[in-house]
Image (spheres, rainbow, N blue to C red):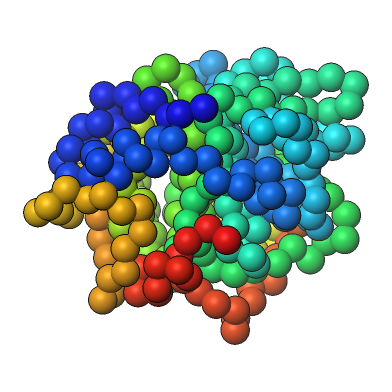
Amino acid sequence: MALHYHPGQIEVQEEANTRPVADMLAHWVGPVGLFASVADLIVLATQRETGELRFASVSGPAPLVDVVGDSAISLPNLELPYDDDGSLAGGIAISLAQLRRARLNGRVSLDEQGWTLEADEAFTNCRKYLAPSVALSETPHAGPVSREPISISDSWLEQVVAGAETSFLASISPYGQPDVSHRGGLPGFLQLDADMGTLRWEEYVGDGMLKSAGNVRATGHVALLILDLATGDAVELVGRAGYITRRRYEEARHSGLEQHGERYPVQGAIDMRIESANRLTGLTSPRRRLEKALRVTSKSTTDQQAPQ
């Protein structure tokens, strides 16, 4: 199940001089089944007929999914707000408390047992930039309960964006495959300009695959999901974006993990023009931030960064 990079991803890898490590990690899978089985949050994205990406999720106490073989997860007895049986979907299974995340991209299907995501791509990511939190619900929850269009200048939206530490980026490949990746940082890392209708954030140094950045470069279609932990609601911003490379390695990068002298070294930046904003009521069960838990950044040792 090796990853196959499209021209947009190869372009940004070449700009950053990370092609060797990207090619190496194309064959990395990692303990996807284990990470999915301990996840207390599953975020899914599909593309609508209009071209817009939109989110749904399942949250609550682990295990939320049944792991089927090496590349599929099923969500039994949960009624997701989907009408997309057979559609391409991107997903991330994440435990923010344990700093574990696995990405699964493929196709969703529905039968009498529930929803299944059969992945053509499945791999784990490192532990960097996750703000530890834990789901408070004792039962599984599928959301959103409702999706309401709101103004970009809505005060609740501005408050959630300003205080955000946890968000998820949905992007899409030239072949129509959605992908969901985590985006985290200190409050203020998401820079909203409501008057201009734009959102900007810096992309921190990751593993060098630049998979989402390459999708953005190739197609420009994005959606960003920003969690309001206390309520379980979320901001969903949909629009078009561009990616700019800021860091190029003088010597080709060969390692997926690096220790830096700064916590949040910048690899690039994404500028997004917001076309629509939604409040997703009841997207997840409410969560509690674990203030004293370990927070892994690029300043952490590579052993701490590694999936475990």
Residue at coordinates 61% horizontally, 28% vertically from top-left?
119
Q: Kindly indicate the quadrant of the structure image that contains residue 261.
A: bottom left
Viewer-proximal residue among 280 and 290: 290
- Above or below — where is 133 with respect to 151? below
Task: Say whether residue 274 is visible.
Answer: no
- Residue 222: image location, x then y, percent: 42, 36
> Quadrant of the image for the C terminus?
bottom right
Task: Indicate the position of residue 251 as horizontal and vertical percent values.
Answer: 12, 52
Q: Is residue 206 left or right of residue 187?
A: left
Answer above or below: position of 230 versus 14. Answer: below
Q: Report the residue at 52% width, 27% height from top.
A: 1
The answer to whether 141 appears left or right of 262 in the picture is right
Q: Name the residue nearer the viewer: 252 or 186.
A: 252
Answer above or below: position of 218 versus 75. Answer: above
Locate residue 11, reporting x and y percent: 21, 32
Residue at the limit of the structure toward the left, as seen here: 250
Residue drawn at point x = 45 percent, y = 49 percent? 152
Is residue 258 visible in this depiction of the protein? Answer: yes
Instruction: List x then y, in percent, for residue 23.
Output: 32, 36
Q: How many marks?
A: 0
Which residue sits at x=89%, y=35%?
77
For this orientation, the residue located farthest to the bottom is: 292
Examine the rendered structure and indicate whether residue 202 appears above or below residue 8.
below
